[in-house]
Amino acid sequence: MRPELELIATAVAELAEPYAIGASPAGLREAIPIAGGTVTGSLLTGTIEPGGVDWCITRADGSAEVWARYAIRCADGANVMVTNAGTVHPQADGRYAGFTIPQFECGAPGYEWTRMSSFVCSLDAAADGASVSLEFYRVA
């Protein structure tokens, strides 16, 4: 059996100015505040709530390990916690792009699928650092 991917939502997260935590043996640790955003799709539609943070480490080779935690307030009022971790790489035009493994957490009725499925996400960060475009896929 081969896995198939089902696009469940696209999102654009707006980012605030990052700040450096400092150098570590793994690389430069930064915190990138998530200021808000929008989510549209077949299974998730709503807004990304302000207050999330991406705690990334930029390695010596320029790639970055991302670990973001934020909340989506769905159009129907449900709140979904997202933890999204993975690796992104610098592109020739200044963007960062890569893949992450999101985990969703929601106890609202109708959102059981968030706990019973596996997901993958494509990530494309704007060269100016102001936003990140995401495509969330459920592995079927």
Image (cartoon, rainbow, N blue to C red):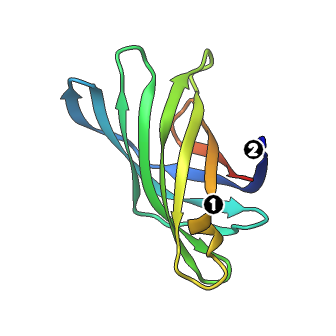
Q: Residues within 10 Å of mark 1 (few under 14, many from 20)?
A: few
> What residue lies at 65% left-to-right and 69% top-to-bottom?
113
As helix, strand or loop, the secondary structure at mark 2 comes to loop
> What residue lies at 53% left-to-right and 42% top-to-bottom?
130
Residue furthest toward the front?
1
* Residue 122 locus on image (x, y percent): 64, 40
Q: Earlier in the sequence, mark 1 or mark 2?
A: 2
> What amino acid type should be assigned to the residue bearing mark 2?
Pro
The answer to which of 52 and 121 lies nearer the viewer is 121
In the picture, the disc for residue 3 is 2
> What residue lies at 39% left-to-right and 53% top-to-bottom?
53
Can you identify the residue that label 1 sits on?
A: 117
Asked if residue 34 lies left or right of residue 10, the reply is left
Q: Residues within 10 Å of mark 2 (few under 14, many from 20)?
A: few
The answer to whether marks 1 and 2 mark residues whose Cβ atoms lie closer than 8 Å is no
Question: How far apart are the alpha carbons under marks 1 and 2?
Answer: 12 Å
